[in-house]
Image (cartoon, rainbow, N blue to C red):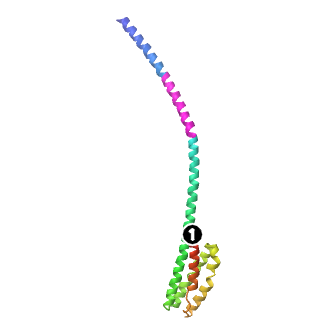
């Protein structure tokens, strides 16, 4: 039995050596396949990554341009709204004048000068018209403070409304 065991152990040893060798070859082939696969995937993904970076750059620029355009539009709308508020103050001054309250009406009307001047700076093509309202406002303020409330703000209101109408069509 000793010989039989020796033969079996020898065969087992040969089998273990054979399986170890096969395992090493399989492991080497697998590692080589993984390296080739990784290189292949890297080669395929590199151009895609570059394209995605380019797309990201373009979309970022477009997004910024859209944000800038929206911001400019919002700013223009805000400035028009400020001009509407100024028109409202002119109407409030007219209401006070109609009620015979000349001094409060004059003070209210005087507060419209700065916003109208700034609107003239904002809307350059309307500058002469808006800033040209300073003299009529000064005359009305002086008259109303002096007790003469016969003159109304119709000309001032008409000019502001005309400018607003033109801005609404731009």
Query: In the displayed structure, would residue 7 be above or below residue 55?
Result: above
**Of helix, strand and loop, which one carries label 1?**
helix
Residue linked to disc 1: 76
The stretch in magenta equals 25-46
Query: In the displayed structure, would residue 85 be above or below residue 32?
Result: below
Query: In the displayed structure, would residue 1 be above or below residue 139?
Result: above
Splitting the image into 4 quarters, where does residue 134 fall? Answer: bottom right
Q: Residues within 10 Å of mark 1 (few under 14, many from 20)?
A: some
Residues 26 and 126: in front is 126
In which quadrant of the rendered image does the N terminus lie?
top left
In which quadrant of the rendered image does the C terminus lie?
bottom right
Q: Position of residue 43 (x, y in %)?
A: 57, 36
Q: Is 28 part of what is drawn in magenta?
A: yes
Q: Position of residue 10 (x, y in %)?
A: 42, 10
Q: Position of residue 52 (x, y in %)?
A: 56, 46
Q: Main secondary structure of the magenta part?
A: helix
Residue at point 50%, 21% (across, down) = 25
Residue at point 57%, 71% (across, down) = 169
Residues 154 and 130: in front is 154
Outermost residue on the front side: it is 169
């Amino acid at each position: 039995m000793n010989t039989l065991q020796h033969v079996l152990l020898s065969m087992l040893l040969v089998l273990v050596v054979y399986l170890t060798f096969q395992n090493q070859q399989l492991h080497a082939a697998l590692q080589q396949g993984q390296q080739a696969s990784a290189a292949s995937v890297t080669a395929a993904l590199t151009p895609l990554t570059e394209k995605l970076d380019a797309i990201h750059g373009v979309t970022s620029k477009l997004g910024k341009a859209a944000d800038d355009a929206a911001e400019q539009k919002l700013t223009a709308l805000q400035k028009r709204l400020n001009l509407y508020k100024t028109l409202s103050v002119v109407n409030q001054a007219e209401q006070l004048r109609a009620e015979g309250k000349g001094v409060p009406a004059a003070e209210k009307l005087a507060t419209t000068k700065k916003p109208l001047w700034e609107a003239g700076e904002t809307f350059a093509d309307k500058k002469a018209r808006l800033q040209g309202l300073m003299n009529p406002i000064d005359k009305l303020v002086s008259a109303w403070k002096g007790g003469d409330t016969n003159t109304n703000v119709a000309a001032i209101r008409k000019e502001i409304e005309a400018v607003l109408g033109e801005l609404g069509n731009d």
